[in-house]
């Protein structure tokens, strides 16, 4: 009974976390099948751990170590899959975004193990009711841990006009690039959109300066709004440039769907990558502590 409850709870956790949207793989049936199969394995490992130990099968503890090794391979699988798809993207995700997605899928299997272990442990050690209650608590806690910080929490995103000063393209007062052809300038002014991302604090300033974070923003925006360009058309490539004085980012894109509100909402929903999290305030605190 305890093992069955643990497996069901772990599988339910994996189903809840297996959400596919415009940002992340998996988005195809075979991807779902692969991750659901791994979720069943993770749920089984977590569910049998406590009952096996209670039965004196101490070798069952080695399953947890083996699981950690196997689920590290999940990260490698995601990294390889998404890396192989990069060459087919008009606007790539970038290695930092790919690594962040890979880490997320590895961590989700560990959350499944933890939920299954707590449910089966509570049912085996106390009662089924206690196991179910622990499962509910673990489910809520795991859901909270699985959440990611978004760009809207670290930066203010506002629309900004596009303009030219000679061949120079500006978003607001931030220079983007030079555009030589008059036809390209007309297309940009007619269909292009711009936005300014202003950091809310010093940590956010560091985050916006990270090139991997910028590429993740450009990829998500291009996926949602589309890109009015083909291969080898650099003047219509989405770009972000940084104002070195203020730390603001200027975003430029020529979308298929010129919807300003969708642009702003999409930028706000881009996840903050672990590798780009600002460390300015922590560095200051460390220097003060050492003085």
Image (cartoon, rainbow, N blue to C red):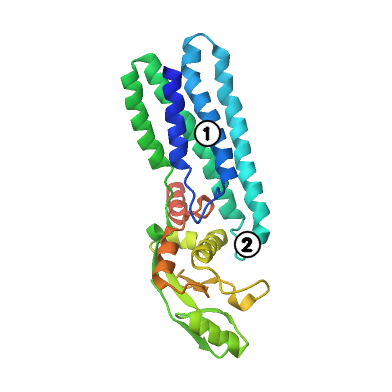
* Residue for point 34% across, 31% down: 136
The x and y percentages for residue 224 are: 49, 64
Local secondary structure at mark 2: loop
User: What crowding class fits label 1: few (fewer than 14 Cα within 10 Å), some (14-19), or many (20 or more)?
Assistant: many
Q: Nearer the viewer, residue 29 or 148?
A: 29
The x and y percentages for residue 106 are: 55, 39
The x and y percentages for residue 35 are: 55, 39
Q: Are marks 1 and 2 in contact (CB under 8 Å)?
A: no
User: What crowding class fits label 2: few (fewer than 14 Cα within 10 Å), some (14-19), or many (20 or more)?
Assistant: few
Q: Is residue 220 left or right of residue 183?
A: left
Q: Nearer the viewer, residue 16 or 101?
A: 16
Q: Is residue 153 visible?
A: yes
**In the displayed structure, would residue 67 be above or below residue 144?**
above
Local secondary structure at mark 1: helix
Figure quadrant of the N terminus: top left
Tag 1 residue: 39
């Amino acid at each position: 009974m305890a093992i069955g409850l643990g497996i069901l709870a772990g599988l339910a956790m994996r189903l809840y976390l297996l959400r596919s949207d415009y940002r992340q793989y998996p988005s195809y049936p075979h991807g779902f099948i692969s991750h659901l199969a791994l979720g069943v394995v993770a749920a089984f490992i977590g569910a049998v751990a406590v009952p096996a130990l209670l039965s004196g099968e101490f070798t069952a503890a080695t399953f947890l170590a083996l699981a950690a090794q196997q689920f590290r391979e999940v990260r490698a699988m995601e990294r390889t899959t998404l890396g192989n798809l990069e060459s087919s993207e008009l606007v790539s995700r970038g290695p930092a975004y790919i690594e962040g997605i890979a880490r997320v899928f590895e961590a989700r299997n560990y959350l499944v193990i933890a939920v299954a272990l707590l449910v089966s442990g509570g049912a085996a050690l106390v009662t089924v009711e206690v196991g179910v209650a622990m499962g509910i608590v673990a489910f809520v806690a795991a859901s909270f841990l699985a959440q990611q910080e978004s760009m809207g929490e670290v930066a203010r995103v506002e629309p900004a006009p596009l303009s030219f000063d000679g061949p120079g393209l500006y978003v607001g007062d931030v220079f983007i690039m030079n555009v030589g052809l008059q036809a390209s300038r007309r297309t940009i002014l007619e269909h292009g959109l711009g936005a300014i991302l202003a950091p809310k604090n010093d940590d956010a300033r560091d985050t916006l300066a990270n090139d991997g974070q910028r590429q993740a923003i450009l990829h998500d925006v291009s996926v949602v709004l589309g890109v009015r360009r083909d291969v080898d058309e650099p003047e219509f490539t989405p770009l972000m440039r940084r104002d070195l004085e203020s730390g603001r980012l200027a975003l430029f894109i020529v979308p298929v769907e010129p919807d300003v509100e969708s642009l702003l909402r999409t930028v706000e929903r881009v996840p903050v990558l672990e590798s780009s999290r600002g460390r300015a305030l922590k560095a200051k605190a460390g220097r003060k502590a050492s003085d």
